[in-house]
Amino acid sequence: MTQTGIAHPTIAASVRGITKTYGTGDTQAIALDGIDLDIHRGTLTAIMGPSGSGKSTLMHVFAGLDSATTGRVMIGDTDITDLDDDALTLLRRRKLGFVFQAFNLVPTLSVLGNVELPFELDGRKPGAGERAWINELLGRLGLSGLENRRPHELSGGQQQRVAIARALASKPTLIFADEPTGNLDSKSSRDVLSLLGVLTREYDQTVVLVTHDPVAASYADRVLFIADGAIVHDVGRSDPKALSDIILMLEVAA
Ligand SMILES: Nc1ncnc2c1ncn2[C@@H]1O[C@H](COP(=O)(O)OP(=O)(O)OP(=O)(O)O)[C@@H](O)[C@H]1O
Ligand SMILES: [Mg+2]
């Protein structure tokens, strides 16, 4: 893998000069319009912004699930911009956890089968410590006792929590979560957000989450606001009211 030597040990991931355009000519859409961003290790970063502003696209580019039109992406000290598919797949599998906006659970697998999928794909079984961690995750996420159910036998909120458990199962260094609390009631949301906070503080994991909910974003160490594919505000930990005020101001400006 490419080692550039410019990476800083406290930076978990970064992008420079990222643009992303879809289509050409009249139908061209600019999803990302020049993004520079460092994500610090062991922190929880929230990304907010209107629907269609580019939040999911940015997460996909960061995680190497989609390529940028221009710009460079670093995960840790690895420049993934020109990595081939095999190397990228390995890096994603070993280092990244991703919670998709659509949960992407495998319908034919049980809850446990879905949660253990990252190990399966890596060609191994979870060890004793990893099984204990998976059990703890299932407990913290309110999924204990549902291990043998299939996704269609779960509520939307339960499916969302399975997707979260799957993303966290292998203790990835970097976790991207797209609206991880979008389908959850306030108690489940708080549980998920507290868990993500614990990961950053106790295990030095790094979490980037997209949310429309100022209460969810108030758990973050840093909150970025995206509008029309660009970062327009970048604030430290803030209370929900302060975050709502920024959103309102952006909506008025739009
Ligand atoms: N595959 C695609 N082809 C064409 N345009 C796309 C594609 N994916 C996204 N876009 C466009 O790129 C822009 C950014 O989309 P994106 O999904 O990143 O928004 P978002 O901020 O995640 O929105 P939401 O809050 O609704 O999830 C939108 O205008 C969208 O229509
Ligand atoms: Mg989205």
Image (cartoon, rainbow, N blue to C red):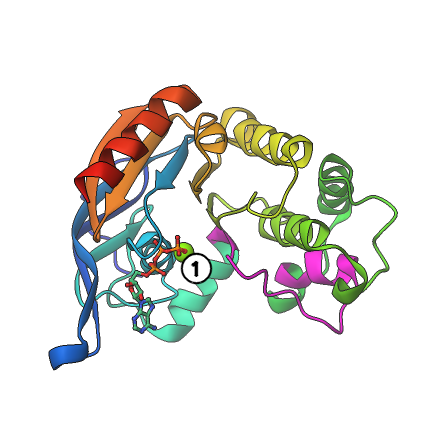
Residue 117 occupies quadrant: bottom right
Quarter of the rendering occupied by the N terminus: bottom left
Q: Residue at x 21, y 42 (%)?
A: 231
Measured along the vertical axis of the image, is residue 133 above or below residue 24?
A: above
Query: Which residue does the numbered mark 1 point to in the structure image?
Result: 91
The segment highlighted magenta reads 95-118
Amino acid type, residue under disc 1 in the picture: Leu
Q: Is the residue marked by circle 1 packed among few (<14), some (14-19), or many (20+) residues within 10 Å?
A: some
Q: Residue at x 59, y 28 (%)?
A: 194
Measured along the vertical axis of the image, is residue 124 above or below residue 99?
A: below
Q: Is residue 11 visible?
A: yes
| Circle 1: element type | helix
Q: Residue at x 46, y 59 (%)?
A: 92
- Lateral position of residue 254 relative to residue 91, left or right: left
Ligand 2 location (quadrant): bottom left
Q: Considering depth in this image, is 185 or 138 the residue closer to the camera?
A: 185
